[in-house]
Amino acid sequence: MNNEWLSNLKVGDKVFLRETYWGIYSYKEVGYVDHILSTGEVCVNGIKFKKGKTSFNSDNPLEFYAYIEECTEQDYVEYMQQRYAEHIEARLQNLSEPLTYEQAQAIARIMGWGNQ
């Protein structure tokens, strides 16, 4: 992992915060740099990162492991668009009311499924 971007971080900068639990579950979110220590450690959402990574359990690093990744403006836009698409997909899977015919047609048109 190229860490040159870490030396250019400033308080308030956006970064991606990646968290892994038990080496299986992985989560990605946008975090913000809280402060930068004189040692070069970067604090994001209250978590200290040395050279962009940390591990909370020294006995078993697979239990919880976190690291930060560079988040450019383009990366941020793409991430937010993906999150929005996932949100809409989840809402479609958990509809409390059935779609109307017109709503179904609009979705089919957008998805390129044609009209019925």
Image (cartoon, helix red, strand yellow):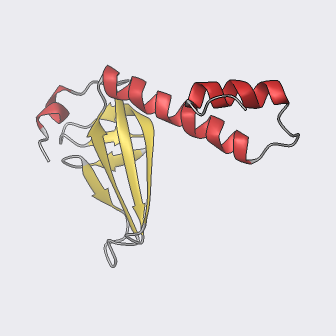
Location of residue 44 in the rendering, given as x and y in whole percent from the top left corner: 38, 39
Q: Is residue 96 shown left or right of residue 23?
A: right
Q: Is residue 44 shown left or right of residue 5?
A: right
Which residue is at 26% across, 52% downward?
53
Q: Is residue 24 shown left or right of residue 61?
A: right
Image quarter in which the C terminus is found? top right
**Residue furthest front in the image:** 116
Q: Nearer the viewer, residue 57 or 31?
A: 31
Q: Quadrant of residue 72?
A: top left
**Residue furthest top in the image:** 73
**Residue furthest bottom in the image:** 59
Which residue is at 75% across, 31% downward?
104
Location of residue 88 in the rendering, given as x and y in whole percent from the top left corner: 64, 35
From what the image shows, is residue 39 above or below residue 20? Answer: above
Q: How many marks?
A: 0
Q: Quadrant of residue 73?
A: top left
Location of residue 37 in the rendering, given as x and y in whole percent from the top left corner: 25, 37
Q: Nearer the viewer, residue 114 or 22?
A: 114
Which residue is at 48% across, 29% downward?
80
Location of residue 52 in the rendering, given as x and y in whole percent from the top left corner: 23, 46
From what the image shows, is residue 80 above or below residue 68? Answer: above
Q: Nearer the viewer, residue 110 or 60?
A: 110
Which residue is at 80% across, 24% downward?
102
From what the image shows, is residue 40 above or below residue 110? Answer: below
Q: Quadrant of residue 113?
A: top right
